[in-house]
Amino acid sequence: MSEETKNVVAKSFMERVIFEATIKYKSLPEINLSGLSSNLSVGGLYLRTRLPLDVDDTLSLSFSLPGQEGGLPLSCDARVAWINCDKNRPKPDYATGVGLQFLNLSSADVTTLEKFIDSYEEEKRMNVVCAWCGTSLGQRKGPFGKTSHGVCEQCRESLAE
């Protein structure tokens, strides 16, 4: 394991921030899906999904950060590191989903993630909008002046159908 990879893995255990955003992913080239994340670190994220996945499955991910410069989404492959589904729920307070470990983030994307996480201040407030319809959901803790995403009740109900 390279020194840079060790640093990224170590940082993933130290700094994890609330991060609700639409994550586009695919497990097979023919299947494009999207879901919501719950948290984010430089080393990975938690993806809310009911898709049956196994530990060590690989997904291709694409997502954007609030206020991201350049507007291009971050893209990488990710390994399913752990599963939180059905009877196997190591984190029962989390929604059904999987913990993902980033595999091949570019050094520029690692820097972008580090800056985003470092700017995240618990006492500051950020705007939250529905990832599906754009409705304002108010504010929550996070980088001041940035916008994050959640899901409004109406969209949550339509997604559950």
Image (cartoon, rainbow, N blue to C red):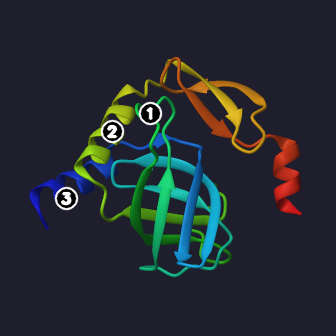
Q: Where residue 44 sits in the image (x, y, percent)?
A: 40, 56
Q: Residue at x 17, y 58 (%)?
A: 6
**Residue for badge 3:** 5
Is residue 52 visible in the rendered structure shown here?
Answer: yes
CB under 8 Å between discs 2 and 1: yes
Question: Label 1: few (<14), some or many (≥20) within 10 Å?
Answer: some
Q: Where residue 45 sits in the image (x, y, percent)?
A: 46, 55
Residue type of the residue flagged with mark 2:
Thr
Q: Residue 5: which quarter of the image? A: bottom left
Q: Which disc number belongs to residue 112? A: 2
Q: Residue at x 32, y 65 (%)?
A: 103
Q: CA distance from mark 2 to mark 1?
A: 8 Å
Q: Residue at x 53, y 78 (%)?
A: 29
Q: Which disc number belongs to residue 68? A: 1
Is residue 94 visible in the rendered structure shown here?
Answer: no
Classify 32 as above or below 48: below
Q: Where residue 26 sits in the image (x, y, percent)?
A: 55, 71
Residue type of the residue flagged with mark 1:
Gln
Left or right position of 76 against 95: left
Q: CA distance from mark 3 to mark 1?
A: 23 Å
Classify 57 as above or below 3: below
For marks 2 and 1, the one nearer the N-term is 1
- Residue at the farthest left position: 3
SS category of the residue bearing label 2: helix
Question: Label 3: few (<14), some or many (≥20) within 10 Å?
Answer: few
